[in-house]
Image (cartoon, coloured by chain):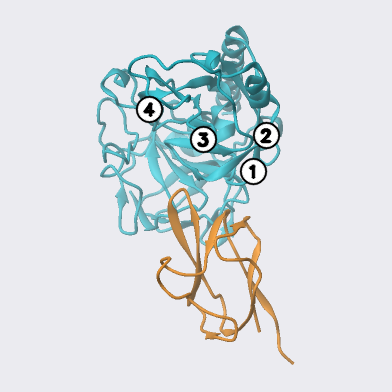
């Protein structure tokens, strides 16, 4: 049995999957991540906040598109 | 002394601001939500103009190196002391060695930490407010970072008697639902068509992710300008006028509105079609990115009354706090 967890955005802003427009994404569906790994960024007020995995697991799905608006507490990534 | 373990997203030292230097291009800076800043100070027995720590979207984590009396107001960032939740809008005792931790804002955008005695950073042009764009005031002119040490001013030991004081619930703003700010149309509102003025006041605007201490960029319908032949010096874009001083709170319309806030640029050539009244600027400063805001048009007398009412309410809160102790 696999347990699913979601990673949420702690604040409102714009979600980015890569550190820079020319760089590859931090992580892709199917990738294994460790707790503390950065999986994306949320920008607000020209500040970029790292979104980190709070537990280790495999990314099953991104629930928001790259450069989409996110709200505080919105689920961004599903891990299993 | 307060030792910062984590600075949050944008935490700065602020007081009521740096007044009297606007003519040289120096904005006032100062607390974005003057009401929350002032109540926090009153709860710890300070005057209105003592410096507090303003935190935006994410609070600080800090260790107190001395015993202190504190209060946290404004946005709810779920503060805790040594891991135990503490109440906001209430006076709290802190012992040397205690760790204060604030999380992300659930309601509102900015929280204020007041300490009895005030945050005792040096004054620059008669103010302890941080103006990060030119790097003056506050702690080294910048946002707080891990390892920073904030000095606390002297406060009499009797301030401990304030611990447990809290303000009435009806004096705590409902930041999640306060979505209307009052404006006075003016300066160059004649540049907008009559329909555009109605659009400005009747539309639901959305706070963009570009909303900080300098200005709040809002998204919504396009505003149409009256056609005219642009005067010399105004530039060709219909949103341009010959240069103006921009009041704090003024709504300029390069395309979509930008409301200028405490760290505003002081002048320029965009049409400035109205001004958010001083009593409501704090509410706008508490609107989170992607939340909606509406403008309600009032006249100057109503704006002055609103300011008087807010000052009277703050004075009543101060009297209540003093009366209880």
Q: Quadrant of residue B88?
A: top right
- Element under disc 2: loop
Q: Earlier in the sequence, mark 2 or mark 3?
A: 3
Check the residue under mark 1 and report the chain it is in: B
- Residue at the (63%, 33%) spot, across then down: B167
- The answer to which of marks 1 and 3 sits earlier in the sequence is 3
Q: Chain A takes which shade in the image?
A: orange
Work out whether disc 1 and disc 4 sit on a shared chain. Answer: yes
| Image location of residue B108, percent across then percent down | 60, 43
CB contact under 8 Å: marks 4 and 3: no
Give the letter of the cyan chain.
B
B122 left or right of A12?
left
Task: Say above or below: B213 vs A31.
Answer: above
Which mark, residue B17?
A: 4
Give the residue pinned by disc 3.
Answer: B40
Query: Along the horizontal axis of the image, is B309 left or right of B44?
Result: right
Circle 4 residues within 10 Å: few <14, some 14–19, many ≥20: many
């Amino acid at each position: 049995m696999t347990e699913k967890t979601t990673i949420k955005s702690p604040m409102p802003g714009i979600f980015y999957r890569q550190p820079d427009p020319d760089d590859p994404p931090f992580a892709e569906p199917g990738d294994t991540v460790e707790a503390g790994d950065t999986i994306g960024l949320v920008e607000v007020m020209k500040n970029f906040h790292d979104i980190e995995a709070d537990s280790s697991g495999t990314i099953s799905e991104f629930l928001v598109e790259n450069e989409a608006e996110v709200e505080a507490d919105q689920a961004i990534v599903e891990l299993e | 002394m307060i030792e910062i373990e984590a600075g949050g997203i944008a935490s700065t030292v602020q007081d009521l601001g740096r007044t009297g230097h606007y003519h040289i291009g120096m904005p006032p800076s100062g607390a974005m939500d003057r009401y929350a800043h002032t109540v926090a100070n009153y709860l710890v027995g300070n005057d209105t103009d003592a410096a507090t720590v303003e935190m935006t979207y994410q609070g600080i984590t800090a260790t107190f190196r001395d015993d202190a009396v504190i209060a946290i107001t404004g946005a709810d960032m779920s503060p805790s002391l040594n891991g135990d939740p503490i109440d906001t809008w209430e006076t709290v005792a802190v012992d040397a060695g205690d760790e204060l931790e604030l999380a992300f804002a659930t309601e509102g955008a900015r929280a204020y930490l007041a300490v009895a005695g005030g945050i005792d950073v040096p004054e620059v042009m008669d103010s302890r407010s941080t103006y990060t764009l030119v790097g003056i005031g506050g702690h080294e002119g910048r946002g707080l970072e891990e390892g920073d040490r904030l000095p606390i001013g002297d406060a009499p030991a009797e301030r401990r008697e304030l611990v447990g004081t809290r303000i009435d619930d009806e004096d705590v703003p409902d930041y999640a639902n306060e979505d209307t700010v009052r404006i006075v149309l003016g300066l160059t509102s004649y540049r907008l068509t009559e329909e555009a003025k109605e659009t400005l006041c009747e539309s639901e605007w959305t706070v963009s992710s570009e909303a900080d201490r300098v200005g709040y960029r809002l998204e919504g319908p396009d505003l149409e300008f009256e056609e005219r032949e642009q005067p010399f010096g105004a530039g060709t874009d219909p949103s341009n006028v010959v240069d103006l001083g921009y009041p704090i709170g003024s709504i300029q319309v390069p395309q979509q509105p930008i409301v200028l806030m405490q760290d505003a640029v002081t002048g320029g050539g965009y049409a400035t079609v109205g001004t958010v009244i001083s009593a409501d600027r704090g509410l706008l400063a508490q609107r989170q990115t992607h939340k909606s805001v509406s403008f309600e048009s009032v006249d100057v007398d109503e704006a002055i009354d609103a300011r008087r009412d807010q000052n009277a309410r703050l004075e009543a809160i101060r009297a209540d706090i003093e009366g209880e102790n």
